Image: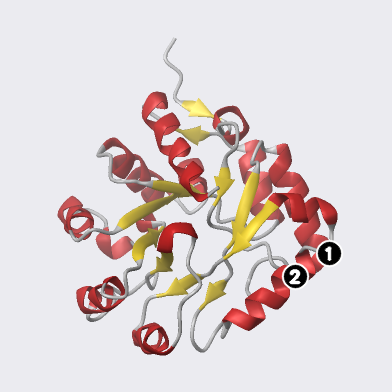
Amino acid sequence: MFKSNFYLKEIVPDGYIDIHNHLLAGIDDGAKTPEETSYLIAQMKALNINAAIATPHTFNGIWNNTSESIKQAYEVALKNDTNKMFLKGYSSEYMLDNTLIVKSNHEKLLGLPHNYLLIEFNLFNNPLNLYEMLFELKTKNYKIIIAHPERYLYLHNSMGKYQKLKQYGVFFQLNLLSLTGYYGKSIQLQAIELLKNDLYDFTGSDIHGEAEINQFKTVPLKIHNKKKMDRLLENNKIFL
């Protein structure tokens, strides 16, 4: 019998590293305390996630993180030996706006290994000057990963908009939570459609707290092509 529902724990490959999460304490809308960081890491390990690179938000006016504030939060997390084994570095999930472009002109951004850079768009409004901003980052040799493209409702119902972004040379990161319906049915369906069209390059948990952990534990991911999903999950190994 054809199976299309899988719990995350069933499908995570050996050595999987998460490249999108909010585990560092007290610097964004993720973990609030070092104790919560340790708790979330223990729960992620129970889901067979082997390691993670921490990616707190940097969003001007809301989460005004700097390289130094993120480094300090990371060092606090490493005081726990279990966390030290699990965490493989720190980066940031940057909001794409003009402030980020100005910042990138004056300092090196906190990228993932191999000069990949995780960015997000505004959830509700199509970014103005989108391609101009992407161009500015590309001229600095960043390999741009767009976080959870399935969540941007203004891109829905137009596969051409997604394909145009891919043709511009950016990478797409699937939020695994989207396949559980965590963000709503339309986002789940969009994630399934992008997966069918082979538009994703990497995956991430986007875990902020216990709510996301419980979702992964209790709600399966809807996956129509298990082999395709397996290959996608393996792609994260380049970040180890």
Q: Which mark is residue 28?
A: none
Q: Quadrant of the N terminus?
A: top left
Identify the residue shown where x is 19% and y is 59%: 161
Tag 2 residue: 75
Residue ID at (69%, 67%): 24
Gap between marks 2 and 1, in whole Å?
Answer: 7 Å
Within 10 Å of disc 1 (Cα), the crowding (few <14, some 14-19, many 20+) is few
Amino acid type of the residue that numbered disc 2 sits on in the rendered structure? Glu
Determine the residue located farthest toward the top in the rendered image.
Answer: 1
| Element type where label 2 sits in the image | helix
Q: Amino acid at mark 1?
A: Lys
In this rendering, position of residue 29 left or right of residue 191: right
Under circle 1, the secondary element is: loop
Give the residue pinned by disc 1.
79
Height in image: 224 above or below 85? Answer: above
Q: Are marks 2 and 1 in contact (CB under 8 Å)?
A: yes
Task: Name the residue at 77% across, 47% down.
Answer: 42
From the viewer's side, name the closer residue of 121 and 50: 50
The percent position of residue 216, horizontal first and vertical second, equals: 62, 42
The image quarter containing residue 117 is bottom left
Q: Position of residue 33 (x, y in %)?
A: 79, 69
Residue 192: % across, % down: 35, 40
Looking at the picture, how far across and down is residue 168, in whole percent?
A: 19, 61
- Left or right: 19 as drawn, with respect to 227: right
